[in-house]
Image (cartoon, helix red, strand yellow):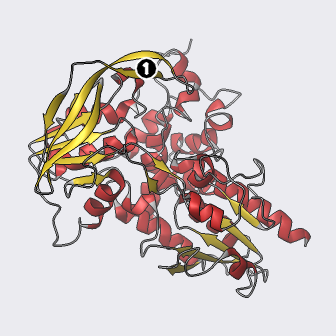
Amino acid sequence: MINFTRKRTQMPEQNAELRRTSFTESQTGYTEEMAICEAMRCLKCREHPCMTRGCPVHNHIPAFIDCICEGRFEDAYNILRKTTCLPAVCGRVCPHEEQCEGNCVRGIKGDSVSIGALERFVADWHREHCTDNVDHEIEKNGRRVAVIGAGPAGLAAAGDLATLGYDVTIFEKTDVIGGVLAYGIPEFRLPKAIVSNEIRKLQDRKVNFELGKTLGADFSLDDLQGNMGFDAVFLGIGAGVAQTMDIPGEDLNDCYLAQDFLNTVNLRQNSELQFPKYRRIAIVGGGNVAMDACRSAVRTGAEKVMIVYRRSETEMPAYEGEINEARAEGVEFVFLTRPTEVLGTDGRVTGLKCLKTKLGEDDSRGYRKPVDIPGTEHVIEADCVIMAVGNGSDADLVEKCGLKCDRKGRIEVDPVTCETSRRGVYAGGDAVTGPLTVISAMGAGRRAAVAIHNRLSED
């Protein structure tokens, strides 16, 4: 009889007090012995729902776990590389509990196999023990593809197309490759050295990068498909337009958009410039970006960091693990509270005016709608407020490109090929779906690469 009660091998990590004071990676990863022990928990089931239902890129999870069981770590890595170009990244930041691990058969009666930790182990083992060499020059096929955006979707599409022999150029509006991987996810969750290593592999495949080049300002789709001579275009432009609450005081000096706050903190990690030190920081929102923001705020040296959320903890969209990590690091959670104004004096934040709420009926998305409780107005003392209330697509850019989009400004595409309303132009990732996960964006980039190859092979 199978022992379903056998516990998973816990990922080693720094204790909470150490984590609070450092941006170094919180989790330290499996040893070889730990990885083999965890891999042996796989039940080798017939249907492989972890792969077929749980993984957007369909990593061959049973096969790479089998290799780990036998100590063949490089073989495990090579299996992963057939379906993902960023295993070291995905092993760290994917929502495994909802995807592969959420569909693990062992998880029905006990703890699922820690697939994410095993993926991370394999990628890290390869980086530490092996040298990536291009065994042969990839034969070019004479066709050119432009990729707009150097985030997960764009990098995945570019990697697959380059391997197929296309001359690929990635145009990125910033001077940083990686998109949200480079400036949006904190160092303690995803070290930038890991991102740089994965990007170097793309450069080894002769992918060209044009940084500081913006679609709609420096060039247009007509330019790309016309005088610039590209045979196809992939748009991986993300959903980088931060939303606000549209309440008074959001223009004060110490009120930040979460995206800007995380960008600034990330980019100052290796510079002499330090993020301003605040005493009390309030983060408005309950998603994963809010968790990244509050945990980063703790590490800037604030005395008190608070999450202010208008619903209860049950309704929070953030992953349970991230909530637990934040709480362990001293973040205070203020639930059923809706901000109505950011208060300030002489342009500086002094507090957050709020109302208490209660949960009413479900809204159109199935969430219980928060309802203000009259007479509960109060002020939360803070000298810094960070708004983490969501991101949206750049509807103006999509309109300028002449592409069909939905009412939220998201690009409409064929669900199989990812082709837009304009022939030869494909799109994927957050610009199409709204903010989702790194691996879902990569999956879209890979589907688009297959469709582009099929189309251009026919022409």
Residue nearest the observer in this picture, 317 or 124 = 317
Q: Is residue 313 above or below residue 427?
A: above
Residue nearest the observer in this picture, 334 or 87 = 334
Task: Point out the residue furthest to the right here.
Answer: 458
The picture places residue 20, in percent across and down from the top left corner, at 16, 45
Q: Residue at x 22, y 19 (%)?
A: 375
Task: Point out the residue furthest to the bottom here.
Answer: 227
The picture places residue 262, in percent across and down from the top left corner, at 31, 56
Q: Is residue 382 above or below residue 260?
A: above
Residue 101 as seen in the image, left or right of residue 249 = right
Mark 1 burial class by Cα count in 10 Å: few <14, some 14-19, many 20+: few
Q: Is residue 138 visible?
A: no
Amino acid type, mark 1: Arg
Residue 188 as seen in the image, left or right of residue 105 = left
Q: Residue at x 50, y 16 (%)?
A: 4
The picture places residue 331, in percent across and down from the top left corner, at 20, 35
Q: Residue at x 27, y 18 (%)?
A: 374
Q: Is residue 160 above or below residue 322?
A: below
Quadrant location of the N terminus in the rendered image: top right
Residue 423 as seen in the image, left or right of residue 32 = right
Q: Is residue 102 visible?
A: yes
Q: Which residue is mark 1?
A: 6
Secondary structure under the numbered disc 1 in the rendered image: loop
Task: Point out the residue furthest to the top here.
Answer: 1
Q: Is residue 105 above or below residue 304?
A: above
Residue 15 as seen in the image, left or right of residue 74 = left
Quadrant location of the C terminus in the rendered image: bottom right
